[in-house]
Image: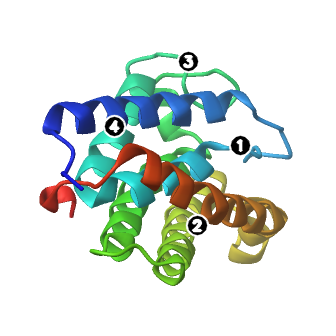
Amino acid sequence: MKPLSPFKMMIYASLCAALTAAGALIAIPVGPVPIVLQNFFVMITGLLLGSRWGLASVGIYLLAGVMGFPVFAGGTGGIGRIMGPTGGYLIGYLPAVWLIGWISHRPKPAPLFDLIAMLCGSLIIYLFGLSWLKLITGMNLWKSLAVGMIPFLPGDAVKIAAALAVVPIVRRTIGELPPTGH
């Protein structure tokens, strides 16, 4: 199979950024951190586009949000969202998508590597998110875990399972990433 051109990769990166923004519109408030689908699309972006193009896609998404476009949870935008309680999760998307792309990008994709990549990416998002949540709110570690991670673990397991089911189909549809996808 012929690798995808840089032009097609830009289109896919833009599409993944738009899907991440759409995933933010579905926000269920459950405290300072809402339940969203953003991290689902960040994981899929890393799996499909690799580390380099995945990073570009999430960077576009975050830049749009910082510029005030309503692409963050609940249709909000602006630098204040990065400075607020959920800012660490948003910033954590950058290293997470890169790591997911780096781990999962193999000559022959393997579900085990995809699973490991998403678990590691989720861990990165939580590390950034919980650290920032704790700093901004003044909560202790246990309270931060109780409101910023534990309620989200079952949903994250469902998102990872859904990504494992969807990504192989999409990979077959879009074709092979260029060798520089890492």
Q: Amino acid at mark 3?
A: Pro
**Element marked by disc 1:** loop
Task: Report the residue at 75% width, 32% height from top.
Answer: 26
Contact (Cβ within 8 Å) of mark 2 with mark 1: no
Name which residue type carries label 2: Tyr
Q: Do the residues bearing badges 3 and 4 touch, measured as CB atoms within 8 Å? A: no
Picture coordinates of residue 63 (x, y %)?
34, 29
Residue type, mark 4 in image = Ala
Q: How is the image coloured?
A: rainbow
Q: In the image, residue 153 lies at what x, y percent?
A: 77, 68
Cα distance between the residues tagged 3 and 2: 23 Å
What residue does disc 3 label?
70
Please give the name of the residue rendered at 44% of the width and 54% of the height, measured from the top-left corner.
171
Q: Which mark is residue 126?
A: 2
- Camera-near label (2 vs 1) is 1
Q: Residues within 10 Å of mark 2 (few under 14, many from 20)?
A: many
- Kindly identify which numbered label has been placed on residue 53: none
Report the front residue among 144 and 27: 27
Tell which tag, 4 or 1, sits nearer the viewer: 4
The residue labelled by disc 4 is 13
CA–CA distance between discs 2 and 4? Answer: 24 Å
Assess disc 4: are there few (<14), some (14-19) or many (≥20) residues with their C-alpha within 10 Å of its C-alpha: many
Among the two numbered marks 2 and 1 on one chain, the one whose residue lies closer to the N terminus: 1
Look at the image and tell me in which quarter the C terminus lies: bottom left
Q: Identify the disc placed on residue 36.
A: 1
Q: Which residue is at the front of the view, 5 or 20?
A: 5
Say left or right for 54 vs 88.
Answer: left
Q: How many residues crowd mark 3 within 10 Å: few (<14), some (14–19), many (20+)?
A: some
Amino acid type of the residue that numbered disc 1 sits on in the rendered structure: Val
| Cβ–Cβ under 8 Å for marks 4 and 1 | no
Residue 54 image point, x, y percent: 33, 50
Say what secondary structure mark 2 lies in: helix
